[in-house]
Image (cartoon, helix red, strand yellow):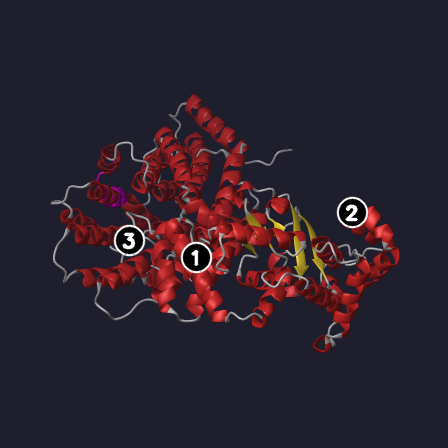
Amino acid sequence: RVRSILQAKNCLVILDNVASTSELELLLPSEGRCATLVTLRDRDIASAFEGDLLRLAPFDIRESMTFLVEMLGLARVQAEEAASNRLINFAAGLPLILRLIGGTILSTDSLSLAEYAKLLQDKLAKLPDWEVLADQERKVRATFEVSFQRLLPALQPLFASLGLFQARHFSVAAVAHLNQLSPAEATLYLTRLTRAALIQPMESLAGDTATSGRYQIHTLLQLFAFAKLSDVSTPLSDWRARLHDYYTQFVSRHSGAAIDVEWINVAGMLQTALAGEDKGQLAALIQPLTEAEVSNIGYMDSRGQYGLALSCLTALLTDEKTLDQAAIHYKCGVFARRLARHEQAPDFLKRSLELLAPYAPTAALALSQAAVYEQLGRYYQQRDIEEAMDHVMAGLELLTTYESETANIQRNALLNVQAAVMFHSGVDRQAAIRVAENALASLGEAQNLVRLNLLINLANLYAQVSDMTRAYQHTHHGLTIARELGNKRKIAALVSNKGALERRQGQISEALQTIEDARQLFVELADFDNVGTSLNNLAMLYYQLEQDETAEACLAEALDLAEAHGLDELKLFVLTTWSKIHIRAGAYDKAAAQLAECDRLIPVNTGGTSFYLLPYINLHKGRLSYQRGQMDDAIRYLELAIREGRTQDRETVGLAQATYAELLVDLKQLESVKARYEEALAILVDHDVYEQALAQRSYAIYLRTHESASSGTEIAELMASADRTLAKFQPEP
């Protein structure tokens, strides 16, 4: 994920405390545009990588003395100069030890430097279990022990409890609940720990107002704190139960940004409950985090936490025939679809319908069933389009007798899917747009998720019918709402759509940046399917810029993601795009192997039904056959691409017609060439200006060579338009 974010960026990357070569290999940016600073303790790790090696020496005596004076004041250090020197010698130049020494002395007015130096030496001598450790590590442990023992008895269990927080940062409220204190008492105790340099306020580290009132603990101190839990009277199970109780209440009362701050701690509690197979604790936490609304499954859905959500929910599945199990199956279906598990998701959803069927009809039941039908309807691309429409109509039928705000929202969510299915079928695309626009209008001014989904869908539909003005308007409006709602998943999707619009219009630098921005957003969401799609989109741009090496690097990373996460559709996209690069480069055997792999994957995705990527794949099979001189095969594949694409993918129709026209010119079969070029140009003008320019140039050459009656002005205009567009794709001098 880190490498994906950093590719082609100018950044200073700091990798702190690297413990192994494998860690470094995972995180080290592959591109040469990043400067990387790595800190580590093992020189052998550094020797495995190229780079300048700089040994950071500990503080010398003068630097250590300066550090101590800054903490304790010159007068106190000078008053006990001999003891100060003993403390400096003990710390061996390690800033962490010096900071703890200073903090402990400051927090205890009655403790002299000489007394503290003796305490440290005595504690160091009483660590027989640590003899195997290096001298510095033993001194760190001894310093921790003395700092801990100098705490007031009431503070010791509180400090130990800080070892339970996964994030290494925590709020006053969480610490208060964990230690059964009032917020005022917890604040007082945390202030004392801060004075002892055992914790730090987060503001002093990051200056981030979102972390106001929170504290952070050093990794080594947190490990030490956790170990100290065994020394306090409260059993570990009681500590964990209190922490679970706090975060269960927290996620029930908060949403969005508030949970963002605590997410690492919350996720840690989910993982603990999951690993411990404690279904009661797991259900109590996961329910509010996946609270189902129309087209949204709560916080974890909006933040892209699909994998963890699905793992938690599947752990709660049973054979019981209850409404709760119907709801869990529904949620599993949604998250499986988010993860592109297109064989698994419909099974979850259909099981949800089966569990709902025996119950008497009510408005609530109809809404639940309609929500399931909405999700099943979204499989119009991966499965049979008529079946998808049947699901949508079944959902709409359920809601005909119910009139409420919630029913209206769910009805419009179904209409949104209906519009997408209608448009995809190619029956009447303007009618599909009218369905979506009417649904949008019926929502009024409500700024909800259904409105957002309608805007996203309409932006895509308008782009497909060449109305780029409305496509941009709906995209920008959608981004505004997504940001107001704090829905990171939708923000990422809309940024991605914006990049696609810019690419289509030949706005190269803007598209590169926007698609890269989208990729980073998807990386943060761990949405690997869309990370890979963004990489594929970047590869297409780099292909058009004739930067094939960079394009292939993007595709290689996308393919790794597809294989690591079982994303077969992404793999199909990537392999087909890669075959396009190989065809242009004359690497026909490689292209053939990739397209053969596509053939192997298609039945896995569709169960033998028609598949929406088939036109695109057949286009490239046709192009490969054409380049190899296998004209009969080329014609067969191109005709398949055109026939299938008319209902599924108009852009592919345009590309296939342009290629078919070139092939017919080579065969000197000129009867339909002009008509094919004209259809190609009419389609591509709205889909891909780069491909349009290539078709314009090819058409102009054809007219000049074979159509003597053609206007010289028309030919010149075609060539000039093509040259202007293609100039955008040339590298700057």
Question: How far from the left and from the top, in percent, is residue 413?
Answer: 25, 44
Q: Residue at x 49, y 66 (%)?
A: 239
- Which residue does the numbered mark 3 point to in the structure image? 379
Residue 546 in the magenta stretch? The answer is no
**Where residue 529 sits: x, y (%)?**
43, 54
User: Is disc 2 placed on a helix, strand or loop?
Assistant: helix
Given residues 719 and 255, the one toward you in this image is 255
Going from N to C along the chain, the mark reached first, 3 or 1, is 1
The residue lying furthest to the top in this view is 713
SS at mark 3?
helix
Asked if residue 409 lies left or right of residue 55, the reply is left
Of badges 1 and 2, the one in the foreground is: 2
Mark 2 nearby-residue class (10 Å; few <14, some 14–19, many ≥20): few
At label 1, the amino acid type is Tyr
Question: What residue do we see at 14% from left, 44% from top?
Answer: 402
Residue 561 in the image: state x and y as whole percent. Answer: 48, 58
Residue 396 pos. (x, y %): 17, 46
- N-terminal of the pair, mark 1 or mark 2, is 2
Residue 457 picture quarter: top left
Left of 288 or right of it: where is 207? Answer: right
Q: Which residue is mark 1?
A: 247
Residue located beneath label 2 in the image: 70
The stretch drawn in magenta includes residue 424:
yes
Element at label 1 = helix
Of residues 106 and 8, the one drawn nearer to the viewer in this rendering: 106
Q: Nearer the viewer, residue 716 or 539?
A: 539
What is the distance, in whole Å, between disc 3 and disc 2 at their CAs?
Answer: 65 Å
Q: Is residue 431 visible?
A: yes
Q: Residues within 10 Å of mark 3 (few under 14, many from 20)?
A: many
Magenta-drawn segment? 414-430
Image-quadrant location for residue 227: bottom right
- Dominant secondary structure (helix, strand or loop) of the stretch shown in magenta: helix
